[in-house]
Amino acid sequence: MTNLRFNVRAKTKKADIAMIARFEALIGCRLPPEYSAFLQAQNGGEPRPREYVRVSDGEKSAVDFFYHLGSGIWSLQSIARLSWREKTVPKDFLPIARDFFGGDICMPLSGIEVGRVRYCPDDLGLLEFGTDGFPAESSTVLIANSLNGFLESFHELDG
């Protein structure tokens, strides 16, 4: 595994079990265990290195930053509400990070995809929509089969 470090954003503290429980109550479901552990250990920030390769198609991309539990525009609370209200990610997908190109990196919260990590492009022209008005899951791209697999795939940008 790459020596993954995070530059913590100002005023962000590690999430505790109570913070996670409040967020789970807010969204109405439990977080995948790997993600809950990540929030307790890290709670967002800017990863170094930041480049990864998607398992589905071998394409390279990079994470700008992971969202955090707390307050502010880039908090999970704000991003989740905005994404679900504006229907920019599939229903029951939680944005966990921002891709360098502006799309959201998400985790499905229900169904057989729970715990996987997927990319949801921010270009609405690339998305297919379901009858519920949310982007279809088929519009997303599999990044990794687990959060830990995703984090372990980070490597230095190619020169």
Image (cartoon, helix red, strand yellow):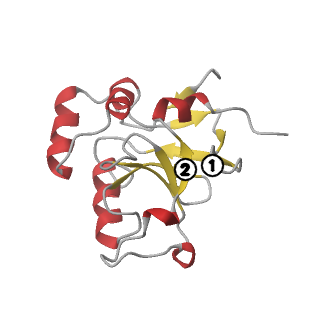
Residue occupying image coordinates x 30% and y 76%: 132
- Give the quarter of the image for residue 40: top left
Q: Please say if 72 is above or below 32.
A: below
Q: Is residue 157 left or right of residue 159?
A: left
Which residue position holds label 2?
142
- Residue 122 or residue 137, whichever sits in front: 137
Q: Determine whether the residue tagged by mark 1 lies in a helix, strand or loop.
A: loop
Q: Is residue 154 left or right of residue 89?
A: right
Q: Quadrant of the N terminus?
A: top right
The percent coordinates of residue 112 (x first, y second) are: 36, 46
- Residue 99 or residue 45, whichever sits in front: 99
Q: Amino acid at mark 2?
A: Leu
The percent coordinates of residue 95 (x first, y second) are: 40, 52
Residue occupying image coordinates x 29% and y 30%: 15
Which residue position holds label 1?
56
The percent coordinates of residue 85 (x first, y second) are: 28, 69
Disc 1/disc 2 C-alpha distance (Å): 5 Å
Q: Please say if 81 is above or below 155.
A: below
